[in-house]
Amino acid sequence: MAERPLDLDAVQAFVHIAELGSFTRAAEAMRTTQAAVSLKLKRLEARLGCRLVERTPRYVELSARGTAFVEHARELLEAHDRALTAFAGARRRLTIGISDHVAGPELPALIARMNAQDPKLLIEIRIGSSGDLLQSFDRRELDTVIVRLHAGRSDGEIITEEKFGWFAGPGWQHRADEPLPVATLAEPCGVRVMSSRLLDEAGVPWTEIFVGGGVAAVAAAVMAGLGVAALSPRMLPFGALDVGARLGLPDLPRLPVLLHTRVGDGRPRDALAALSAAFRGAVRG
């Protein structure tokens, strides 16, 4: 039996590296520096007497020993959390609003990561437009919102920036003698306003062919061949094509994802840090 217990912070750092595939993302999730995470991992590897992570200039992956250890590491952290929460009071509640243009197919995995960070935390998530969610946040109906940059707001912490493009379904062709058919989200939507303004400024004739109540509906219209839409690549099924350059459409800017929160510290803030780091990984992945 080992004489000296494992450092739980070091084990947590290793699990974050394994799940996020990055020392940088792991440091963001733990609200510390990359150097500190590297040191924690080095000490854990020294304690176990083996290399857990293989590092190269281009990627990070688990070694054979690391792959074998990661599930044990998760079980150790879960047991530790259960021991702590057995003496905790009522479950804490965290209400989060996430913009429909931000909440992508990775959302279930991101929620699972938050839950793993604090299983005692009661998480309530609402999906909506950035404008509506910010109004709810200002009315103190939400503790935190993760949204696109909204006109008239200069507050919030930038989590990441995401590329947008003009996407169409495979095989879709634009008839040059007709206005560009565009699928959009219903108002209010900042991406809708931005994309229509850019088309007008570029002198591109266009018409609204479909209005969806959510990004999934707009993506479905695109894949059905109705027209084009301004979306981020991760919101679309495999096979969608960026047709902006071919059609001479105006370039779309990288759009920031911002975190607005009143959560100051403690386990809820740690859960938000893990969620923010996971969003960065999803967007850049």
Image: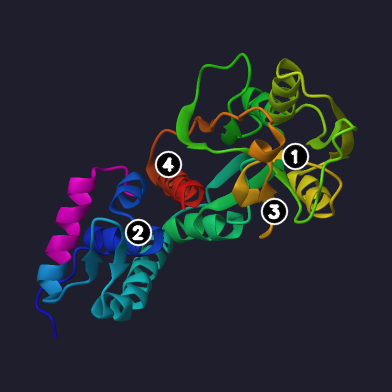
Name the one closer to the observer, 150 or 3.
Answer: 150
Q: Is residue 145 left or right of residue 45?
A: right
* For discs 4 and 1, the disc positioned in front in the rendered view: 1
Pointer 4 and pointer 1: residues touching (CB < 8 Å)? no
Residue under circle 4? 269
- CA gap, disc 4 and disc 1: 35 Å
Q: Residue furthest top?
A: 152
- Name the magenta segment's main secondary structure: helix
Residue under circle 1? 229
Per the image, label 2 sits on a secondary structure element best described as helix
- 10 Å neighbourhood of mark 3: few (<14), some, or many (≥20)? many
Q: Is residue 35 magenta?
A: yes
In the rendered image, which quarter contains the N terminus? bottom left
Name the one closer to the observer, 182 or 92.
Answer: 182
User: Which disc is residue 240 wearing?
Assistant: 3
Label 4 vs 3, first from the N-terminus: 3
Q: Which residues are magenta?
A: 30-44
Residue 99 seen in the figure: no
Mark 3: amino acid: Ala
Q: In the image, what residue occupies the spot 81% across and 28% down?
A: 187
